[in-house]
Image (spheres, rainbow, N blue to C red):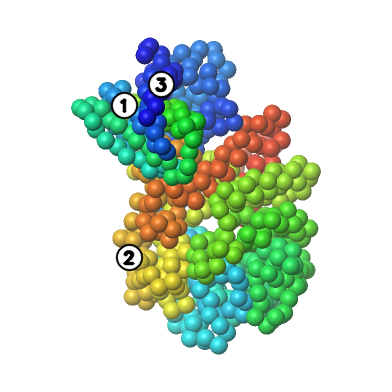
Amino acid sequence: MKSHTIELPRPQVAADQLGFFRFGDIAGRVLLTNDAGEWHFLGREDFAALVAGTLPAEHPERPTLLAKGFLRSELDLDALSERIRRKKSFLGNGPHLHVVITTLRCNQDCRYCHASRTDMDQVQTDMSLETAKKVVDLAMQSTSNYVAFEYQGGEPTVNMDVIKFCVEYSREKNRYEGKTLDHSVVTNFTYMTEEHAEWLLANDVLVCTSLDGPEELHNYNRTWRSGSDAYGSVREWMAYFNRRWIELGRDPHLWHVDALTTLTRRSLEQWKDIVDLYVGLGIRSVHLRPLNPFGFASKTWDQIGYSTDEYLAMYEEALDYIIDLNKAGTTIIEGTAAVLLKKMLTPDDPNYVDIRSPVGSGTGQVAYNYDGTILPSDEGRMIHAMGDPMFVLGQVGSTSYSEIVGHPTVKSMAVASLLDSLPGCSSCWNAPYCGVRPLHNYRQTGDLFAQRPNTPKCAEHMTIARLLFERLAEDTTGEVEAIFRRWTVQRPRVRDED
Amino acid sequence: MTAENARFTFSIDDRSLALLLDEALYPLDAIYGAAYLFVDRCYIFLDRPADKQVQVRFRTKSDSTEQDLEALAGEFANELLNQVLRLRISESTKSIREYTLARAFFGDSSQASIDALLAELDAEELADDPLEINVPWESGT
């Protein structure tokens, strides 16, 4: 056994001169962050002086450090409290996202399908109108003034009657509730008809589809059971909807088919083709999310899966490519980056239910299975579909709204994702921008909490936040920050006559 | 060890690294906090060989050279000093955080509400002013 000795400079600390902050090394500098989401870079020597209480009164960084609450003298506690209140205002809202599984039937057989699909003859997996009515009755009780119904499946348009009923019934109820309602359908477009399309257009239902990439990649990932060209169908219906919205006089920047890509191993090799396809189609957002470890995907992981390191290496290349596209005048954003940037660059939080503290499961979103089973999220539904009833919150018709949001399972998930109380997270520089996914933890380790450094989501969120801060730290001209700020602006998608 | 420098003595064996820490210099919470950040790369064993002394032993999950272990020791020592700083800041700002978080989540936001109400009233008055009370006399004809 060999013995060694190292000596390191011990920091001098004048803690009584400091406000509360977390810190970490990024881009050769020290990043300070606090509970209000404020952040500031300091050189190492300046940081040492700040901590030691020897930062000169005339130091150029001092006014900014004071304004952001990193120094104790002249600290405006009430103003800081208000900034924290605004940042965390979602805590008082209640569930806004209501995922309705209209059916499990689907005519595609995707390699990664995490939606627990069934074949088209399994009509018993259709939601009934009676169940749909109970779903809407429950969802409209949410304390959130904004309620978004998201129709998923299976392929949700296979049970179009339930979509139509939910849209019309919720709007009828809303004459008395006065909420802001959104309806969106997540469709693979393989079951779309002109009649359905025109109804969706006439009723202001937002449409989102899966577009995994160029034709060969899309059709490889998303097999259509009929043997037909899934890619061609998606392109055809995207063009149809986008054309018709323009004909109806809608702003095409707001009213267009949104698209999501699911990344398989083969997708990682073709990330540039995916981004270029989206740009070519005029889609302004591409969300490069890693594959979920749920449902069928786990069975075929060896074929289509990849490591977190492989994903993050791809992400960094793609992020820089997307930034370069923006520099050249093309507007396209990356979804996860946009969520984190909204937290970093604005006084608000986007209330993205998967990346917030605590997580939105049960308090920001609720999922309703085709049979009326209530679950805290779509991921909870997938775990349920895998035969594990751990996350069932109740049944529409017999479970009340307060029983859902106050359910012990929902409370457990909130505790397991409250960054201020989690080891490793409570002192992490990324705490104001991060979010824990207890269902992922449970699926991957059998433990809602898990050990943070051992979870892929920790590496994913930390690395992406670090990449963004590095790009900001190295941005001497302000060009990148200007691009990033544009990514945080979202105009509300309302009818022009509203 | 000088007042400015912290000295860390550690021993290295096959895939293992051990440090003996004085709890008077390094609070237990700082040791836990620093060690926790290495659980993805190492198995970590804590022991108390004597009063106020904590032994931290790392066993790497994959093969490692002597240089790897030396680098690991340096990384841990750095992190330990950071954790001590984090702990000092956290303890010193405890009452500040309790106040700001309590006010943010449970506090009286009446001032903000009053401001909002006044702004709303101003807007209403400006919008509906049949007697032209808000019209400055200079602009009258």
Which of these two is toward me, A234 or B49? B49
Q: Which residue is rendered at x = 74% and y = 57% of the image?
A: A273
Q: Which residue is rendered at x = 50% and y = 21% of the image?
A: A47
- Label 1 resides on the chain identified as B
- Label 3 resides on the chain identified as A
Closer to viewer: mark 2 or mark 1: 1
Q: Which residue is rendered at x = 46% and y = 13% of the image?
A: A54
Image mark for residue A403: 2
Quadrant occupied by the N terminus of chain B: top left
Q: Residues within 10 Å of mark 2 (few under 14, many from 20)?
A: few
Image mark for residue B21: 1
Closer to viewer: mark 3 or mark 1: 3
Q: Amino acid at mark 2?
A: Glu
Residue A171: % across, % down: 53, 71
Q: Which residue is mark 3?
A: A5
Q: Are marks 3 and 1 on the same chain?
A: no
- Label 2 resides on the chain identified as A
Which of these two is toward me, A494 or A364? A364
Outermost residue to the left: B51
Residue A235: % across, % down: 75, 69
Q: Amino acid at mark 1?
A: Leu
